[in-house]
Image (cartoon, rainbow, N blue to C red):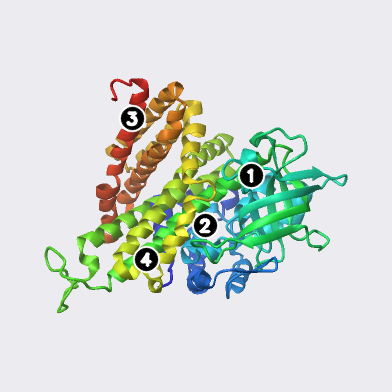
Amino acid sequence: MNYQPRPDDQRFLLDTVLGATPRLRALGPFAEFDDALQAQVLDEAGKFVAEVIAPLNRTGDETGCRFAEGEVHTPPGFREAYAGLVEGGWLALSAAPEDGGQGLPAVLEAILFEWLSAANHGLTMAPGLLHGAYECIRHHGSEALKTRYLPKIASGEWLATMCLTEAHAGSDLGQVRTRALPQPDGSFRVSGGKIFISGGEHDLTPNIVHLVLCRLPDAPAGPKGLSLVLVPKQLPDGARNAVHCERIEEKMGLHGSPTCVMRFDDATGWLVGEPNRGLAAMFVMMNAARLHVALQGIGLLDAAWQKADAYARERRQMRAPGPAPASRGAEAADLIAEHPAVRRILETQRAWIDGARLLAYRTALQLDIARHDADPARRERAERACALVTPVLKAACTQQAFDGASACLQVFGGHGYVREWGIEQVLRDARVTMIYEGTNEIQAIDLVVRKLLPDGGAGIASLLIELRDELDASRDFDAEVQRRFAQLRYLGTTIALAAQRDPALAHEVADDYLRVVAIALMAWAWARIGNAAPETPRWTAPAAAFRRFVLPEFEMRLGMVKRACEAVMSPGAAA
Protein backbone atom coordinates (compact mmCIF):
# COMPACT_ATOMS: atom_id res chain seq x y z
CA MET A 1 0.00 0.00 0.00
CA ASN A 2 1.09 3.57 -0.67
CA TYR A 3 1.28 6.12 2.12
CA GLN A 4 -1.89 8.11 2.77
CA PRO A 5 -1.80 11.48 4.58
CA ARG A 6 -4.56 11.86 7.15
CA PRO A 7 -5.15 15.60 7.59
CA ASP A 8 -7.68 15.11 10.38
CA ASP A 9 -4.86 14.07 12.72
CA GLN A 10 -2.90 17.23 11.92
CA ARG A 11 -5.98 19.42 12.36
CA PHE A 12 -6.68 17.91 15.76
CA LEU A 13 -3.13 18.52 16.99
CA LEU A 14 -2.89 22.02 15.52
CA ASP A 15 -6.35 23.32 16.37
CA THR A 16 -7.64 21.40 19.40
CA VAL A 17 -4.39 20.76 21.25
CA LEU A 18 -2.06 23.64 20.29
CA GLY A 19 -4.63 26.29 19.39
CA ALA A 20 -2.39 27.23 16.49
CA THR A 21 -4.63 29.60 14.54
CA PRO A 22 -5.04 32.31 17.21
CA ARG A 23 -1.33 32.17 17.96
CA LEU A 24 -0.48 32.59 14.30
CA ARG A 25 -3.02 35.37 13.72
CA ALA A 26 -1.28 37.36 16.47
CA LEU A 27 1.79 37.54 14.20
CA GLY A 28 1.71 40.35 11.65
CA PRO A 29 2.24 38.36 8.42
CA PHE A 30 -0.50 35.88 9.34
CA ALA A 31 -3.24 38.27 10.45
CA GLU A 32 -5.55 36.91 7.72
CA PHE A 33 -4.74 33.26 8.39
CA ASP A 34 -7.75 31.19 9.46
CA ASP A 35 -8.93 27.60 9.90
CA ALA A 36 -10.50 27.51 6.44
CA LEU A 37 -7.20 28.39 4.76
CA GLN A 38 -5.35 25.87 6.87
CA ALA A 39 -7.85 23.15 5.98
CA GLN A 40 -7.65 23.96 2.29
CA VAL A 41 -3.84 23.82 2.25
CA LEU A 42 -3.68 20.56 4.20
CA ASP A 43 -6.41 18.84 2.17
CA GLU A 44 -4.89 19.79 -1.18
CA ALA A 45 -1.37 18.92 -0.01
CA GLY A 46 -2.55 15.53 1.23
CA LYS A 47 -4.26 14.83 -2.07
CA PHE A 48 -1.17 15.78 -4.10
CA VAL A 49 1.13 13.67 -1.94
CA ALA A 50 -1.15 10.63 -2.11
CA GLU A 51 -1.88 10.81 -5.85
CA VAL A 52 1.41 12.06 -7.32
CA ILE A 53 4.31 11.49 -4.91
CA ALA A 54 3.52 8.23 -3.09
CA PRO A 55 2.98 6.03 -6.19
CA LEU A 56 6.58 6.68 -7.31
CA ASN A 57 8.16 5.44 -4.08
CA ARG A 58 8.73 1.83 -5.06
CA THR A 59 9.89 2.71 -8.57
CA GLY A 60 12.41 5.14 -7.14
CA ASP A 61 13.80 2.47 -4.82
CA GLU A 62 13.99 -0.34 -7.38
CA THR A 63 15.21 1.73 -10.34
CA GLY A 64 17.34 4.23 -8.46
CA CYS A 65 19.40 7.03 -9.95
CA ARG A 66 21.70 6.41 -12.92
CA PHE A 67 25.11 8.04 -13.36
CA ALA A 68 26.60 8.42 -16.84
CA GLU A 69 29.39 10.72 -18.07
CA GLY A 70 29.11 13.16 -15.21
CA GLU A 71 25.32 13.40 -15.33
CA VAL A 72 22.70 11.95 -13.01
CA HIS A 73 19.35 10.69 -14.27
CA THR A 74 16.62 10.36 -11.65
CA PRO A 75 14.07 7.50 -11.65
CA PRO A 76 11.09 7.51 -14.05
CA GLY A 77 8.39 9.96 -13.07
CA PHE A 78 10.53 11.97 -10.66
CA ARG A 79 11.03 14.94 -12.99
CA GLU A 80 7.30 15.26 -13.66
CA ALA A 81 6.40 14.89 -9.97
CA TYR A 82 8.98 17.48 -8.98
CA ALA A 83 7.67 19.85 -11.64
CA GLY A 84 4.23 19.41 -10.07
CA LEU A 85 5.62 20.44 -6.68
CA VAL A 86 7.02 23.63 -8.22
CA GLU A 87 3.98 24.46 -10.35
CA GLY A 88 1.62 23.92 -7.42
CA GLY A 89 3.59 26.35 -5.27
CA TRP A 90 4.15 23.67 -2.64
CA LEU A 91 7.85 24.41 -2.21
CA ALA A 92 7.16 28.13 -1.71
CA LEU A 93 4.65 27.76 1.13
CA SER A 94 6.58 29.64 3.81
CA ALA A 95 8.82 31.86 1.65
CA ALA A 96 8.16 35.59 1.83
CA PRO A 97 5.74 37.02 -0.78
CA GLU A 98 8.37 39.53 -1.92
CA ASP A 99 10.53 36.55 -2.91
CA GLY A 100 7.70 34.87 -4.79
CA GLY A 101 6.55 32.74 -1.86
CA GLN A 102 3.10 32.28 -0.36
CA GLY A 103 3.99 33.68 3.04
CA LEU A 104 2.26 30.89 4.97
CA PRO A 105 3.31 29.64 8.43
CA ALA A 106 6.34 27.36 8.78
CA VAL A 107 4.20 24.79 10.56
CA LEU A 108 2.28 24.07 7.33
CA GLU A 109 5.56 23.57 5.49
CA ALA A 110 6.62 21.20 8.30
CA ILE A 111 3.52 19.07 7.82
CA LEU A 112 3.97 19.01 4.04
CA PHE A 113 7.55 17.75 4.34
CA GLU A 114 6.54 15.16 6.91
CA TRP A 115 4.03 13.78 4.42
CA LEU A 116 6.43 13.99 1.49
CA SER A 117 9.08 12.08 3.44
CA ALA A 118 6.61 9.41 4.46
CA ALA A 119 5.33 9.02 0.90
CA ASN A 120 8.63 9.10 -0.98
CA HIS A 121 11.76 9.83 1.00
CA GLY A 122 14.04 9.58 -2.03
CA LEU A 123 12.24 12.24 -4.05
CA THR A 124 11.77 14.47 -1.01
CA MET A 125 15.52 14.64 -0.50
CA ALA A 126 15.73 16.86 -3.61
CA PRO A 127 13.91 19.89 -2.13
CA GLY A 128 14.86 18.97 1.43
CA LEU A 129 17.44 21.77 1.76
CA LEU A 130 15.54 24.48 -0.09
CA HIS A 131 14.07 26.03 3.04
CA GLY A 132 17.48 26.13 4.75
CA ALA A 133 19.27 27.55 1.70
CA TYR A 134 16.56 30.16 1.34
CA GLU A 135 16.92 31.31 4.96
CA CYS A 136 20.72 31.27 4.73
CA ILE A 137 20.86 33.51 1.64
CA ARG A 138 18.03 35.72 2.89
CA HIS A 139 19.83 36.44 6.16
CA HIS A 140 23.46 36.47 5.03
CA GLY A 141 23.59 36.96 1.27
CA SER A 142 24.44 40.22 -0.46
CA GLU A 143 21.68 42.14 -2.21
CA ALA A 144 23.02 40.95 -5.55
CA LEU A 145 22.84 37.30 -4.45
CA LYS A 146 19.36 37.77 -3.03
CA THR A 147 18.11 39.33 -6.25
CA ARG A 148 19.64 36.63 -8.42
CA TYR A 149 18.92 33.50 -6.37
CA LEU A 150 16.20 33.95 -3.75
CA PRO A 151 13.13 33.86 -6.06
CA LYS A 152 14.42 30.78 -7.91
CA ILE A 153 15.21 28.95 -4.68
CA ALA A 154 11.99 30.02 -2.99
CA SER A 155 9.92 28.55 -5.81
CA GLY A 156 12.06 25.44 -6.22
CA GLU A 157 12.81 26.33 -9.84
CA TRP A 158 16.45 25.89 -8.80
CA LEU A 159 17.53 23.38 -6.16
CA ALA A 160 20.28 23.80 -3.56
CA THR A 161 22.85 21.69 -1.72
CA MET A 162 24.84 22.03 1.47
CA CYS A 163 28.50 21.05 0.81
CA LEU A 164 30.22 20.41 4.13
CA THR A 165 31.66 16.91 4.30
CA GLU A 166 35.07 15.96 2.91
CA ALA A 167 36.60 12.50 2.67
CA HIS A 168 39.06 13.11 5.51
CA ALA A 169 36.69 15.24 7.59
CA GLY A 170 33.25 13.92 8.42
CA SER A 171 31.73 15.71 11.39
CA ASP A 172 35.05 17.43 12.18
CA LEU A 173 34.50 20.54 10.07
CA GLY A 174 37.63 22.11 11.43
CA GLN A 175 39.59 19.88 9.02
CA VAL A 176 37.89 21.22 5.86
CA ARG A 177 40.50 21.87 3.15
CA THR A 178 38.45 23.21 0.23
CA ARG A 179 39.94 26.58 -0.77
CA ALA A 180 38.44 29.81 -2.07
CA LEU A 181 40.69 32.45 -3.68
CA PRO A 182 39.37 36.04 -3.96
CA GLN A 183 39.25 37.56 -7.45
CA PRO A 184 39.52 41.24 -8.49
CA ASP A 185 35.82 41.32 -9.49
CA GLY A 186 34.70 40.28 -6.00
CA SER A 187 34.07 36.65 -6.85
CA PHE A 188 35.99 33.63 -5.54
CA ARG A 189 37.58 30.60 -7.19
CA VAL A 190 36.69 27.45 -5.25
CA SER A 191 38.77 24.26 -5.43
CA GLY A 192 38.35 21.02 -3.49
CA GLY A 193 36.26 17.92 -3.09
CA LYS A 194 33.11 17.15 -1.13
CA ILE A 195 31.40 13.83 -0.42
CA PHE A 196 27.90 12.74 0.63
CA ILE A 197 26.27 15.65 -1.18
CA SER A 198 22.56 14.94 -1.53
CA GLY A 199 21.37 16.11 -4.94
CA GLY A 200 24.79 17.37 -5.96
CA GLU A 201 23.86 16.56 -9.56
CA HIS A 202 20.49 15.63 -11.09
CA ASP A 203 18.08 16.35 -13.93
CA LEU A 204 15.25 17.86 -11.89
CA THR A 205 16.23 21.53 -12.35
CA PRO A 206 18.51 23.35 -14.81
CA ASN A 207 20.57 24.95 -12.06
CA ILE A 208 21.82 23.73 -8.68
CA VAL A 209 23.02 26.24 -6.08
CA HIS A 210 25.84 24.79 -3.97
CA LEU A 211 26.59 26.37 -0.60
CA VAL A 212 30.19 25.35 -0.02
CA LEU A 213 32.08 25.49 3.26
CA CYS A 214 35.71 26.43 2.49
CA ARG A 215 38.79 28.40 3.57
CA LEU A 216 40.05 31.75 2.37
CA PRO A 217 43.80 32.41 2.16
CA ASP A 218 45.42 33.02 5.56
CA ALA A 219 42.24 31.93 7.36
CA PRO A 220 42.68 30.79 10.97
CA ALA A 221 42.94 27.05 11.53
CA GLY A 222 39.94 25.08 12.71
CA PRO A 223 36.23 25.86 12.44
CA LYS A 224 36.76 29.58 13.11
CA GLY A 225 38.51 29.91 9.77
CA LEU A 226 35.66 28.62 7.60
CA SER A 227 33.77 30.73 5.07
CA LEU A 228 30.65 30.01 3.03
CA VAL A 229 30.63 30.51 -0.74
CA LEU A 230 27.70 30.16 -3.12
CA VAL A 231 28.78 28.18 -6.19
CA PRO A 232 26.09 27.65 -8.86
CA LYS A 233 26.15 24.83 -11.38
CA GLN A 234 25.19 27.37 -14.05
CA LEU A 235 26.77 30.83 -14.05
CA PRO A 236 24.69 34.00 -14.54
CA ASP A 237 25.78 34.22 -18.21
CA GLY A 238 24.47 30.69 -18.83
CA ALA A 239 27.90 29.03 -18.97
CA ARG A 240 28.55 25.78 -17.07
CA ASN A 241 30.60 26.33 -13.92
CA ALA A 242 33.60 24.15 -13.08
CA VAL A 243 31.52 21.94 -10.77
CA HIS A 244 31.67 18.21 -11.45
CA CYS A 245 29.98 15.10 -10.09
CA GLU A 246 32.54 12.28 -10.07
CA ARG A 247 30.19 9.50 -9.04
CA ILE A 248 27.11 8.67 -6.99
CA GLU A 249 27.21 6.36 -3.99
CA GLU A 250 25.71 2.86 -3.93
CA LYS A 251 23.68 3.02 -0.75
CA MET A 252 21.73 0.86 1.68
CA GLY A 253 18.61 2.93 1.02
CA LEU A 254 17.42 6.21 -0.46
CA HIS A 255 18.04 4.88 -3.96
CA GLY A 256 15.85 7.60 -5.46
CA SER A 257 18.18 10.33 -4.16
CA PRO A 258 21.64 10.78 -5.72
CA THR A 259 24.35 11.05 -3.06
CA CYS A 260 27.24 12.62 -4.95
CA VAL A 261 30.99 12.96 -4.79
CA MET A 262 31.62 16.51 -5.99
CA ARG A 263 34.74 18.25 -7.32
CA PHE A 264 35.23 22.00 -7.63
CA ASP A 265 37.99 23.01 -10.07
CA ASP A 266 38.48 26.76 -9.70
CA ALA A 267 34.71 27.09 -9.78
CA THR A 268 33.32 30.62 -9.59
CA GLY A 269 31.39 31.58 -6.48
CA TRP A 270 30.41 34.47 -4.23
CA LEU A 271 30.83 34.89 -0.49
CA VAL A 272 27.78 34.44 1.73
CA GLY A 273 28.11 36.36 4.98
CA GLU A 274 31.41 37.53 6.42
CA PRO A 275 34.84 35.99 5.82
CA ASN A 276 35.69 33.25 8.34
CA ARG A 277 32.10 33.33 9.58
CA GLY A 278 30.79 30.57 7.37
CA LEU A 279 29.52 28.39 10.20
CA ALA A 280 27.37 31.23 11.54
CA ALA A 281 25.72 31.50 8.13
CA MET A 282 25.54 27.74 7.68
CA PHE A 283 23.88 27.13 11.06
CA VAL A 284 20.83 29.08 9.91
CA MET A 285 20.54 26.38 7.27
CA MET A 286 21.45 23.46 9.52
CA ASN A 287 19.01 24.24 12.34
CA ALA A 288 16.12 24.37 9.87
CA ALA A 289 17.39 21.19 8.23
CA ARG A 290 17.54 19.34 11.55
CA LEU A 291 13.90 20.04 12.33
CA HIS A 292 13.00 18.73 8.89
CA VAL A 293 15.05 15.58 9.53
CA ALA A 294 13.06 15.06 12.73
CA LEU A 295 9.91 15.35 10.62
CA GLN A 296 11.39 12.81 8.20
CA GLY A 297 11.68 10.44 11.14
CA ILE A 298 8.07 11.00 12.14
CA GLY A 299 6.86 10.56 8.58
CA LEU A 300 8.85 7.38 8.00
CA LEU A 301 7.60 5.89 11.26
CA ASP A 302 4.04 6.73 10.24
CA ALA A 303 4.64 5.08 6.85
CA ALA A 304 5.88 1.93 8.58
CA TRP A 305 2.97 1.99 11.01
CA GLN A 306 0.39 2.36 8.22
CA LYS A 307 1.79 -0.68 6.43
CA ALA A 308 1.94 -2.78 9.61
CA ASP A 309 -1.51 -1.70 10.80
CA ALA A 310 -3.10 -2.51 7.43
CA TYR A 311 -1.41 -5.92 7.35
CA ALA A 312 -2.42 -6.71 10.94
CA ARG A 313 -6.07 -6.02 10.08
CA GLU A 314 -5.99 -8.55 7.22
CA ARG A 315 -3.68 -11.33 8.36
CA ARG A 316 -5.17 -14.10 10.52
CA GLN A 317 -3.06 -16.36 12.73
CA MET A 318 -4.13 -18.58 15.65
CA ARG A 319 -6.58 -17.58 18.36
CA ALA A 320 -5.96 -14.42 20.35
CA PRO A 321 -5.88 -14.94 24.15
CA GLY A 322 -8.74 -13.64 26.24
CA PRO A 323 -12.38 -13.05 25.27
CA ALA A 324 -13.29 -13.67 21.65
CA PRO A 325 -12.79 -10.49 19.61
CA ALA A 326 -15.73 -9.06 17.68
CA SER A 327 -13.90 -9.71 14.40
CA ARG A 328 -13.70 -13.48 14.96
CA GLY A 329 -16.94 -14.63 13.38
CA ALA A 330 -16.67 -18.05 11.78
CA GLU A 331 -12.99 -17.68 10.97
CA ALA A 332 -10.61 -20.37 12.15
CA ALA A 333 -8.01 -17.83 13.26
CA ASP A 334 -8.07 -14.28 14.60
CA LEU A 335 -6.61 -11.15 13.05
CA ILE A 336 -3.11 -10.60 14.33
CA ALA A 337 -4.24 -7.08 15.25
CA GLU A 338 -6.16 -8.79 18.09
CA HIS A 339 -3.02 -10.42 19.55
CA PRO A 340 -1.55 -8.47 22.50
CA ALA A 341 2.04 -8.70 21.22
CA VAL A 342 1.07 -7.08 17.92
CA ARG A 343 -1.19 -4.51 19.57
CA ARG A 344 1.70 -3.48 21.79
CA ILE A 345 3.94 -2.87 18.77
CA LEU A 346 1.33 -0.87 16.87
CA GLU A 347 0.09 1.18 19.80
CA THR A 348 3.60 2.00 21.02
CA GLN A 349 4.65 3.29 17.60
CA ARG A 350 1.41 5.27 17.38
CA ALA A 351 2.28 6.85 20.73
CA TRP A 352 5.64 7.95 19.35
CA ILE A 353 4.14 9.33 16.15
CA ASP A 354 1.46 11.43 17.84
CA GLY A 355 3.61 12.71 20.70
CA ALA A 356 6.55 13.58 18.46
CA ARG A 357 4.23 15.29 15.98
CA LEU A 358 2.90 17.59 18.66
CA LEU A 359 6.42 18.53 19.75
CA ALA A 360 7.57 19.10 16.16
CA TYR A 361 4.54 21.24 15.31
CA ARG A 362 5.00 23.29 18.46
CA THR A 363 8.64 23.83 17.49
CA ALA A 364 7.58 24.93 13.99
CA LEU A 365 5.18 27.41 15.61
CA GLN A 366 8.10 28.69 17.69
CA LEU A 367 10.01 29.23 14.45
CA ASP A 368 7.16 31.41 13.21
CA ILE A 369 7.22 33.36 16.47
CA ALA A 370 11.00 33.76 16.30
CA ARG A 371 10.72 35.20 12.79
CA HIS A 372 7.64 37.35 13.04
CA ASP A 373 6.66 38.31 16.61
CA ALA A 374 6.70 42.07 17.23
CA ASP A 375 8.11 41.60 20.73
CA PRO A 376 11.92 41.10 20.69
CA ALA A 377 11.79 39.26 24.02
CA ARG A 378 9.28 36.73 22.69
CA ARG A 379 11.35 36.28 19.53
CA GLU A 380 14.47 35.61 21.57
CA ARG A 381 12.66 33.17 23.86
CA ALA A 382 11.29 31.29 20.87
CA GLU A 383 14.75 31.10 19.28
CA ARG A 384 16.19 29.64 22.47
CA ALA A 385 13.41 27.06 22.66
CA CYS A 386 14.02 25.98 19.07
CA ALA A 387 17.77 25.70 19.65
CA LEU A 388 17.18 23.44 22.66
CA VAL A 389 14.42 21.24 21.28
CA THR A 390 15.74 20.76 17.73
CA PRO A 391 18.65 18.42 18.59
CA VAL A 392 16.37 16.41 20.88
CA LEU A 393 13.77 15.96 18.17
CA LYS A 394 16.32 15.18 15.46
CA ALA A 395 17.94 12.43 17.50
CA ALA A 396 14.86 10.94 19.18
CA CYS A 397 12.58 10.95 16.13
CA THR A 398 15.14 9.44 13.79
CA GLN A 399 16.16 6.78 16.32
CA GLN A 400 12.51 5.83 16.69
CA ALA A 401 11.99 5.86 12.93
CA PHE A 402 14.53 3.07 12.57
CA ASP A 403 13.67 1.14 15.73
CA GLY A 404 9.95 1.54 15.14
CA ALA A 405 10.16 0.55 11.48
CA SER A 406 12.01 -2.57 12.57
CA ALA A 407 9.26 -3.32 15.07
CA CYS A 408 6.63 -2.75 12.37
CA LEU A 409 8.51 -5.13 10.06
CA GLN A 410 8.18 -7.73 12.82
CA VAL A 411 4.39 -7.54 12.48
CA PHE A 412 4.74 -9.03 8.99
CA GLY A 413 6.84 -11.96 10.16
CA GLY A 414 8.76 -13.47 7.24
CA HIS A 415 6.76 -11.41 4.75
CA GLY A 416 8.35 -8.25 6.14
CA TYR A 417 11.80 -9.39 5.07
CA VAL A 418 10.88 -9.65 1.40
CA ARG A 419 10.51 -6.72 -0.94
CA GLU A 420 6.90 -7.32 -1.94
CA TRP A 421 5.34 -5.61 1.07
CA GLY A 422 7.54 -2.49 1.05
CA ILE A 423 8.21 -2.37 4.78
CA GLU A 424 11.89 -3.29 4.34
CA GLN A 425 12.39 -0.19 2.18
CA VAL A 426 11.14 2.05 4.99
CA LEU A 427 13.66 0.44 7.34
CA ARG A 428 16.52 0.95 4.88
CA ASP A 429 15.54 4.51 4.04
CA ALA A 430 15.14 5.47 7.70
CA ARG A 431 18.61 4.39 8.78
CA VAL A 432 20.46 7.34 7.27
CA THR A 433 18.39 9.91 9.15
CA MET A 434 20.32 8.99 12.30
CA ILE A 435 23.54 9.95 10.51
CA TYR A 436 23.12 12.99 8.30
CA GLU A 437 22.64 16.61 9.36
CA GLY A 438 24.82 15.78 12.36
CA THR A 439 24.86 12.25 13.78
CA ASN A 440 22.59 11.59 16.71
CA GLU A 441 25.62 11.42 18.99
CA ILE A 442 26.58 14.92 17.88
CA GLN A 443 23.04 16.12 18.57
CA ALA A 444 23.36 14.81 22.12
CA ILE A 445 26.77 16.40 22.61
CA ASP A 446 25.42 19.68 21.22
CA LEU A 447 22.57 19.56 23.72
CA VAL A 448 24.78 18.90 26.74
CA VAL A 449 28.11 20.58 25.94
CA ARG A 450 26.87 23.61 24.00
CA LYS A 451 23.42 24.17 25.50
CA LEU A 452 23.40 22.76 29.04
CA LEU A 453 26.89 23.36 30.44
CA PRO A 454 27.49 27.02 29.49
CA ASP A 455 24.62 28.26 31.67
CA GLY A 456 24.47 25.38 34.15
CA GLY A 457 21.11 24.23 32.85
CA ALA A 458 19.34 27.58 33.20
CA GLY A 459 18.18 27.64 29.59
CA ILE A 460 16.64 24.18 29.71
CA ALA A 461 15.09 24.97 33.09
CA SER A 462 13.50 28.08 31.56
CA LEU A 463 12.05 26.01 28.71
CA LEU A 464 10.61 23.46 31.13
CA ILE A 465 9.01 26.23 33.17
CA GLU A 466 7.48 27.65 29.99
CA LEU A 467 6.05 24.22 29.10
CA ARG A 468 4.78 23.81 32.65
CA ASP A 469 2.98 27.14 32.41
CA GLU A 470 1.40 26.07 29.10
CA LEU A 471 0.04 22.98 30.84
CA ASP A 472 -1.41 25.11 33.61
CA ALA A 473 -2.89 27.65 31.19
CA SER A 474 -4.57 24.93 29.13
CA ARG A 475 -5.88 23.21 32.28
CA ASP A 476 -3.88 20.12 31.40
CA PHE A 477 -2.11 20.05 34.77
CA ASP A 478 -0.33 16.75 35.26
CA ALA A 479 1.51 16.19 38.54
CA GLU A 480 3.65 13.42 37.07
CA VAL A 481 4.85 15.64 34.23
CA GLN A 482 5.65 18.39 36.70
CA ARG A 483 7.59 15.94 38.87
CA ARG A 484 9.65 14.75 35.91
CA PHE A 485 10.35 18.31 34.85
CA ALA A 486 11.64 19.03 38.35
CA GLN A 487 13.86 15.93 38.20
CA LEU A 488 15.15 17.05 34.82
CA ARG A 489 16.01 20.53 36.07
CA TYR A 490 17.91 19.06 39.00
CA LEU A 491 19.68 16.59 36.71
CA GLY A 492 20.95 19.44 34.53
CA THR A 493 22.50 21.12 37.55
CA THR A 494 24.04 17.83 38.65
CA ILE A 495 25.67 17.23 35.26
CA ALA A 496 27.04 20.77 35.19
CA LEU A 497 28.66 20.32 38.59
CA ALA A 498 30.06 16.86 37.81
CA ALA A 499 31.44 18.03 34.46
CA GLN A 500 33.59 20.59 36.27
CA ARG A 501 35.49 17.68 37.82
CA ASP A 502 35.54 15.45 34.75
CA PRO A 503 35.04 17.15 31.35
CA ALA A 504 34.62 13.74 29.67
CA LEU A 505 31.49 13.05 31.70
CA ALA A 506 29.28 15.34 29.63
CA HIS A 507 30.18 13.44 26.47
CA GLU A 508 29.69 10.04 28.13
CA VAL A 509 26.17 10.76 29.41
CA ALA A 510 25.01 12.92 26.48
CA ASP A 511 22.99 10.21 24.71
CA ASP A 512 21.24 9.16 27.91
CA TYR A 513 20.54 12.74 28.91
CA LEU A 514 19.00 13.50 25.52
CA ARG A 515 16.70 10.48 25.92
CA VAL A 516 15.67 11.70 29.38
CA VAL A 517 14.75 15.07 27.88
CA ALA A 518 12.94 13.44 24.94
CA ILE A 519 10.79 11.19 27.16
CA ALA A 520 9.95 14.11 29.45
CA LEU A 521 8.86 16.20 26.46
CA MET A 522 6.81 13.27 25.16
CA ALA A 523 5.11 13.06 28.55
CA TRP A 524 4.25 16.73 28.25
CA ALA A 525 2.89 16.14 24.75
CA TRP A 526 0.69 13.27 25.87
CA ALA A 527 -0.60 15.31 28.81
CA ARG A 528 -1.75 17.90 26.27
CA ILE A 529 -3.15 15.31 23.86
CA GLY A 530 -4.78 13.14 26.52
CA ASN A 531 -6.81 15.99 27.98
CA ALA A 532 -7.99 17.20 24.57
CA ALA A 533 -8.65 13.90 22.78
CA PRO A 534 -12.00 12.15 22.70
CA GLU A 535 -12.40 8.91 24.64
CA THR A 536 -11.94 6.68 21.61
CA PRO A 537 -9.45 3.84 21.02
CA ARG A 538 -7.72 5.99 18.39
CA TRP A 539 -6.34 8.16 21.20
CA THR A 540 -6.75 6.15 24.42
CA ALA A 541 -4.81 3.12 23.12
CA PRO A 542 -1.58 4.99 22.24
CA ALA A 543 -1.92 7.08 25.42
CA ALA A 544 -1.97 3.89 27.49
CA ALA A 545 0.91 2.42 25.47
CA PHE A 546 2.98 5.54 26.13
CA ARG A 547 2.46 5.23 29.88
CA ARG A 548 3.20 1.49 29.97
CA PHE A 549 5.91 0.97 27.37
CA VAL A 550 7.64 4.32 26.74
CA LEU A 551 7.52 6.38 29.91
CA PRO A 552 9.42 3.86 32.11
CA GLU A 553 12.53 4.61 30.06
CA PHE A 554 12.64 8.01 31.77
CA GLU A 555 13.48 6.49 35.16
CA MET A 556 16.00 4.08 33.66
CA ARG A 557 17.95 6.76 31.77
CA LEU A 558 17.67 9.19 34.67
CA GLY A 559 19.24 6.60 36.94
CA MET A 560 22.05 5.93 34.48
CA VAL A 561 23.00 9.60 34.26
CA LYS A 562 22.72 10.14 38.02
CA ARG A 563 24.93 7.15 38.72
CA ALA A 564 27.57 8.41 36.29
CA CYS A 565 27.54 11.81 37.99
CA GLU A 566 27.78 10.22 41.43
CA ALA A 567 30.80 8.21 40.31
CA VAL A 568 32.55 11.49 39.53
CA MET A 569 31.37 13.48 42.55
CA SER A 570 31.69 10.69 45.15
CA PRO A 571 33.65 7.79 43.65
CA GLY A 572 33.41 5.63 46.74
CA ALA A 573 29.63 6.00 47.08
CA ALA A 574 28.99 4.97 43.47
CA ALA A 575 31.35 1.98 43.45
- Amino acid type of disc 3? Lys
The answer to whether the residue labelled 2 contacts the one labelled 4, judged by CB atoms less than 8 Å apart, is no
- C-alpha span from label 2 to label 4: 22 Å
Q: Position of residue 526 (x, y in %)?
A: 33, 48
- Label 2: how many residues lie within 10 Å, few (<14), some (14-19) or many (20+)? many
Of badges 4 and 3, the one in the foreground is 3
Q: Position of residue 266 (x, y in %)?
A: 79, 51
Quarter of the image with the N terminus is: bottom left
- C-alpha span from label 4 to label 3: 38 Å
Lower sequence index among marks 2 and 1:
2
Of badges 2 and 3, the one in the foreground is 3
| Relative horizontal placement of residue 261, taking residue 42 as reference (left or right) | right
Can you say whether 409 is above or below 133 in the image? Answer: below
- Disc ID at residue 306: 4
Q: Residue at x 42, y 22 (%)?
A: 497
SS at mark 2? helix
- C-alpha span from label 1 to label 3: 35 Å
- Label 4: how many residues lie within 10 Å, few (<14), some (14-19) or many (20+)? many
- Amino acid type of disc 1? Met
Lower sequence index among marks 1 and 4:
1
* Residue at numbered disc 1: 282
Q: Position of residue 157 (x, y in %)?
A: 68, 64
- Label 3: how many residues lie within 10 Å, few (<14), some (14-19) or many (20+)? some
The answer to whether the residue labelled 1 contacts the one labelled 4, judged by CB atoms less than 8 Å apart, is no
* Residue at numbered disc 3: 562
SS at mark 4? helix
